[in-house]
Image (tube, coloured by chain):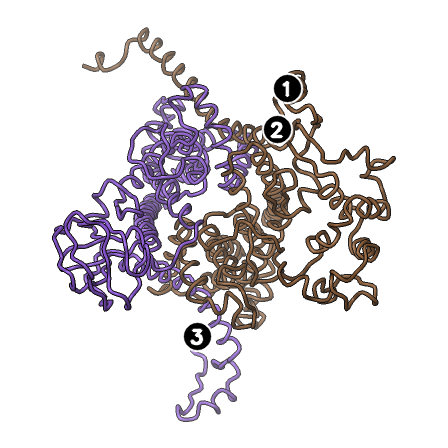
Amino acid sequence: MAAPVQTFSSDDKHKSASLNPLAHKSRPFESFIQLLLFLCGVASIFTTVGIVLTLGIEASSFFANRGVTSVNRQLVSEITPESTNIQLSTGGFAFEVGHVIEVEDELLFVTEVIDRENVVVTRGFNESPIKTHPAGKEVHKSNLVTLTEFFTNPTWQPQIAEFGILPLLTATLLISFIAMLIAIPIGLGTAIYLSEYATPRVRNTLKPTLELLAGVPTVVFGYFALTFITPILRGIFGENVVGVYNMASAGIVIGILIVPTITTISEDALRAVPRSLREASYGLGATRFETTVKVLVPAALSGILAAVLLGISRAIGETMVVAIAAGAGPNLTLNPFEAAETITGHIARISTGDLSYGSMDYKSLFALGLTLFIITLVMNLFSSMITRRFREAYQ
Amino acid sequence: MTDSSLPKVDSFKANLEKRQRVGRLWSRIFYMCNFVAILTLIALAFNISNNAFGYVAMSYKKDPVALSETPIETMDELGLAQILQREVPKKLRVIIRDALSRVPNEEFSQLSLQQALGGAVLAPEIATLKISEITDEQAIQVLKDNLDQGGLYNLVVQHVVEPIIRESWTLFDSLTKRETISQRIAEKYPEAKMEFRSWVNPMFLSNSISSDATTAGLRTALIGTLWVIVVTSIFAFPLGIGSAIYLEEYATDTWLNRLIETNIRNLAGVPSIIYGMLGLTVFVRLLAPLTSGAMFGVQGTDGRTILSAGLTLGLVILPVIIINAQEAIRAVAPSIREASYGLGATKWQTIARTVLPASTPGILTGVILSLSRAIGETAPLIVVGASTFITIDPDGPFSKFTVVPIQIFQWTAKPQQEFRNTAAAAIVVLMIVLMLLNSVAIFLRNRYSRQLTS
């Protein structure tokens, strides 16, 4: 065992390397490659940091930012609580539509700019007290939507300074709900069939169909929803009941498009259940169906749950189908046959127009984006947490 | 006690039959679930072809039959050029501009032909002249020298024949209600002809975007997609494969490496529209001097360019590439690595000469799949700002652009049935490209899995 060990004086490393050809050599090229690959790996972290920062910074400047900007302008004439036209002194900062003017503690939302001196406003923005302001009062620029308003205001109409996410959120959730109504039974049924019933040959022909379905771009599904599913729905329920753009058809199609996601993950979970459990169940005289429903599905439940969560997260983040088939314009309704815009649909529609960077409209998109990001991130984290736990159970 | 807990034989048998019936019923239900995917694909194929083919009521400004003795599709370049000269002598210069110009329209008439038509074949005596100074014959010569038969045919159709589609019908109606359609055309559009039209046709592929569905084409969008994909590939492939190598071969179990790993899984689940917002802020606005090309002396664009779009899509597909490449690298047997180390190879030599070659088919499969995802991706590019109506073909990373899926989206959003037809035709083109890509991926995967099993 004991090989003759050569000892070297520690003060002469160069000498030691040349004496012992097997000693650790410094290889600059190897280290360089390793560094390069490490940087590639770290790049993905920058992506996440980038997402959080961009959404965070723009969104936080959208939300309650108490600091007012001094704009060096005054009121030229007195404004009464009724007047919506205000006259400002010349010079200083030029207000644009979407800006919020602060006079004393009242907030005025700019809805129209007639010229540099005259602007039309909505009074008492964000529940601020409407008052009479005398001529000569200093005017400030304010940027202010509170979180409470964002989550409780039932209207989303940036033109008149109504920034309530509720209509967009309900549409998003309703469409996702319809999607899951379709995707969970079908995805799960397919997964059970593929893992428990199908012969390898049948499985090998059915799986590629799912892959094919998963490979269809979502814009094509959007076209499909609008030109195929919607006419069918209108045929069944009547043209007066179902709109040309409606949430039901978008929901159904999104449901179909997440079937592959749910099937693949649930099937993996079902296959990961040890054989012994199946055999024990058959040994007790259970039928195949009873084994599946009473033994395998409960055993794979965490994996199935992870699949469902991932499916919901995909449904919430899906953009093109809703942008094409669900209609434009926020609408607070629970009727699936009406048109309503989702968070993603709204972001997509507003982005197609000419947006001026820095306007309230523009910033509001980032507040929406941040909400969307947080919802999907929580879903995904839960999903991967559950997956990790279920892996521990059987491996 | 024992007796009562055991079922009676009769009731057991009756119960057993019921249990088996339930089992059979559910096995049928599970089986049916599979057909939803298949039925959807069939319905999708039906729906697309239903809109991409069918009868149209077509009227012409000039009937092609009246133009010449022989059908114009089969005429040679000379004949076609003569038709142009005879029928539209006043429009020749505009035609040259639209077909061959490399510069913005407002500069075209001020420049010499050599500058305006950079790269075109020109007779030496006219190269330095402006477009207004050449004769009709010379103009015809320019067109004839620079376009093939197909190109000239397109020009004749666009500028002389000028077909207008009055109304279009779906394939299903065309096959089942032929009589009704022909009656309706005779009543409503007496001047129009009933024709069977494939909306996917050579002209559709070679024409640029148009506000008129009859002559609208996909060329600009196809070129845009190609450019964007090139940028995406150059950016995302090395980065993605590099990350995968690092994570599989170098990374030890430290908090940082675990963070990278978790992070990549989470990025894969971020909605693609969020990447669009990242791209808008970082690439379009923050890095505008770079992405607009201002740093390289390109003028007249903002950050909404092919480069921004390509980089954004690169970020979208990065997690997909990394996860697939990781799996491919993991599948390489440890014995291969050990053999290489045993021969005295260093770590990088082992990776570069044994691990990577062995995992190439797997990595390639992932790369192709992510590529097809990038080609079909729409939402982030909407946010990044794909221009929807551009007349000049993109010719570099700093051009404005549109891509095929955006074009589909735009056409679908229009109310006229004719644009539904062009959208369907664009979908056909897109799906053919994607299917070709996917079959390459499947082919590679099959070869790969055979190698592993043998």
Disc 1 marks which residue?
A: B184
Crowding at dot 2, Cα within 10 Å, few <14 / some 14-19 / many 20+, comes out as some
- Horizontal side of residue A203 vs B219, given as left or right: left
Three-letter residue code for mark 1? Arg
Give the x, y percent position of residue B329.
52, 57
Which is more foreground, mark 2 or mark 3? 2
Q: Which chain is purple?
A: A
- Position of residue A218 relative to residue B375, above or below, is above
In the rendered image, is residue B176 in sight? no
Question: Which chain wears brown?
Answer: B
Element under disc 1? helix
Residue B99 circle label:
none
> Which chain's residue wears label 3?
A
Left or right: residue B431 versus residue B275 is right
Q: Is residue B286 left or right of residue A199?
A: left
Q: Residue under circle 3?
A: A1
Q: Nearer the viewer, residue A144 or B324?
A: A144
Q: Residue A288: name its quadrant.
A: top left
As displayed, is residue B379 above or below residue A195? Answer: below
Q: Are marks 2 and 1 in contact (CB under 8 Å)?
A: yes
The numbered dot on residue B167 is 2
Q: Which residue is depicted at the point 50% across and 65% down? A: B291
